[in-house]
Amino acid sequence: MEERRLGPVVGLGTWNTFGGDAARARDVVHAALAAGVRLFDSSPMYRGAEASLGAALEDRRDEVTVATKIWTPSVEEGREQFRRQVGWFGRVDIEQIHNLVRWRDHLEWLEGERDQGRVTKLGVTHYAAGAFEALAEALRTGSFDVVQLPYNPHEREVEEELLPLAAERGIAVIVMRPLGEGDLLRRPPTAGELAPLREFGVETWAQALLKWALSDDRVDVAIPGTSRVERAGENAAAGSPPWFGPDERPLVERPLP
Ligand SMILES: NC(=O)c1ccc[n+]([C@@H]2O[C@H](COP(=O)([O-])OP(=O)(O)OC[C@H]3O[C@@H](n4cnc5c(N)ncnc54)[C@H](OP(=O)(O)O)[C@@H]3O)[C@@H](O)[C@H]2O)c1
């Protein structure tokens, strides 16, 4: 079970932050690499983000884990998405079926790619609580090594079934939307309110939220997205111990202002 673990670490998400701006993407990727980030998440849905990520990684490709996705109701188009990814990344370390779209059919050919070594791990994702029962059903097939799901103090539905299931089966967990798409950062607590978390290496509210997710030992990777170079380093710094215990996690579970 242990070799399936990917973390706990902070990775970098690329939705809404990379699309169409390859120069900015390169700067953010380089800042993330400099800060120690070694997992990058993308998707064909993210408007050019995969191409920007591939170009930005340049000669550092072998140092990192690329997690991307297949997102289409067509198997033929799915295979085409994969061919393009092999062009950008050489191989795909974690290939995820995005939003469960036609997952049974994609799983069939992706298992073939995994057997051939062009994909290392297979994953499946969904962002909506209404799809979590279907996500659990996919995990119960035993075919997936990784699941990607939303988890932050205001989205905790995954605690009911998905996190226990992933832990029981040794499935690695990647957390999307750890900052609630930025909504949880609009009115951060004061420095005084953050003070009890300082001995855990937390200096900012974003770091508190990221550490909150990673301190659940069923979670492997949190993948905050950012378009800002300085935030790539700030976020990455939350990916090291010490982790929060039962006294600290509730301090991050404050109501939305
Ligand atoms: N499979 C799916 O269905 C799915 C769905 C959603 C997301 N995802 C994946 O999960 C990743 C993360 O989710 P997300 O990007 O939606 O949401 P998120 O990571 O929770 O939040 C991203 C937002 O937070 C802001 N932010 C980041 N770091 C910050 C900091 N230190 N201080 C203040 N603001 C900060 C960013 O703005 P700035 O750009 O201004 O920094 C951005 O608007 C995505 O990028 C994607 O890779 C997957």
Image (spheres, rainbow, N blue to C red):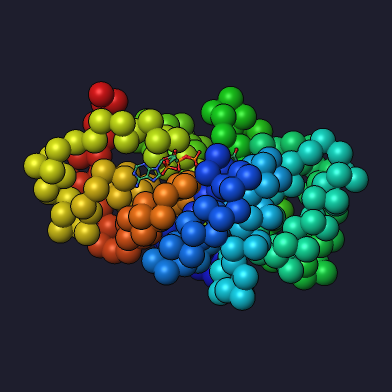
Residue at 15 percent of width and 58 percent of height: 199
Quadrant (top left/top right/bottom left/bottom right) for the N terminus: bottom right
Q: Where in the figure is residue 138, as x and y percent of width and height?
A: 68, 42
- Apparent side of residue 99 relative to residue 65 in the rendered image (left or right): right
Q: Residue 170 occupies which quadrant of the picture?
A: bottom right
As drawn, the residue found furthest toward the front would be 23
81 relative to 161, above or below: below
Residue at 81 percent of width and 62 percent of height: 113
Residue 67 visible somewhere in the drawing: no
Total numbered labels? 0
Q: Where in the figure is residue 154, as x and y percent of width and height?
A: 37, 30
Tell which of 48 and 24 is nearer to you. Answer: 24
Tell which of 91 and 244 is nearer to you. Answer: 91
Q: Where in the figure is residue 174, as x and y percent of width and height?
A: 52, 51
- Apparent side of residue 196 relative to residue 88 in the rendered image (left or right): left
154 relative to 247, above or below: above
Residue 69 visible somewhere in the drawing: yes
